[in-house]
Structure formats: structure tokens, C-alpha cells
Image (tube, helix red, strand yellow):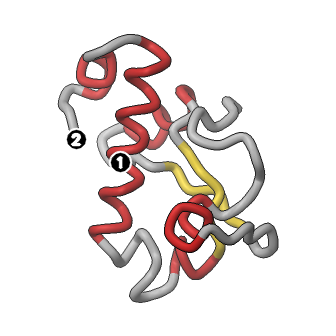
Amino acid sequence: MAKSILQKDKECYLCRRFYNLRTTRGLEEHHILFGRGRRELSERYGLKVWLCHNHHNEPHLGVHFDPAARRVLEQAAQFAFDELHGPGSFAEVFGEEI
């Protein structure tokens, strides 16, 4: 299992980003990209983050219900991937840019 390339600390990525809170309890691992083999690629390349349950799987805040929150994670994943592997590498591996 690859470590996340988006975060070093085990805390809710979105609590930290949106509210500057360090939520460390009840965390769930979230693979940022999904579908068509993308979940496996997310695992391989570390495109995953820790999220609290509310930001992961609860309406209306959870990334599985909130397209805006999902987009924030997808854009952050593309940026981190291109920073690590070179400009345009995200599009080469995943077939498109976010």
C-alpha cells in the first residue's frame, strides 16, 4: 500500500483544509479517483487521503455526496501528482486532466 502523496499526518484532509481543524478520530481512508480501474491506480500512486466520517460518507458534507468537495480532492490529487512526476504526467497515467 502506497502512502498518500497529499498528506503526511493522519487527520481529516477536509477538516484541515476548510476549517483548519485537526480531526484525528473516526478517520476513514478515501481513494480520490474511482471507476474504470482508477481506485487501484489511486492506491498504487498514493492518491488517497484520510477523512472524518462526516466528510467521507455522510450527506451533505461527504465527498460521496458533495461534488464540490470531490472536485477539491481531485484537483489537489492532480496537482500533487504532476508536482511529483512532472507536468502532464497525471493526464498520461489517468487519461485526462481534472
* Image: 68 above or below 78: below
Q: Extreme bottom residue here? A: 59
Q: Residues within 10 Å of mark 2 (few under 14, many from 20)?
A: few
Q: Secondary structure at mark 1?
A: helix
Q: Earlier in the sequence, mark 2 or mark 1?
A: 1
Dot 2: element: loop
Residue placed most toward the observer, 41 or 81: 81
Residue named by callout 2? 98
Q: Residue at x 40, y 71 (%)?
A: 64
Numbered marks: total: 2
Q: Amino acid at mark 1?
A: Glu
Please state the horizontal and vertical placement of residue 84, each as a whole percent of the image: 49, 18
Placement of 20 over or under 95, stated as above or below = below
**Along the line of sight, which residue is nearer the eye, 21 or 57?**
21
Residue at image position (43%, 21%) is 83
The answer to the question of whether label 2 and label 1 lie on touching residues, with beta carbons closer than 8 A, is: yes
Quarter of image, res 8: top right
Q: CA distance from mark 2 to mark 1?
A: 7 Å
Most foreground residue, 37 or 55: 55
> Which residue lies under the disc numbered 1?
74
At which x and y percent is residue 42? 49, 37
Q: Amino acid at mark 2?
A: Ile
Q: Position of residue 14 (x, y in %)?
A: 54, 65
x then y, percent, for residue 2: 67, 30
Q: Does residue 23 appear to the left or right of 50 in the view shown? A: right
Q: Is residue 31 above or below residue 22?
A: above
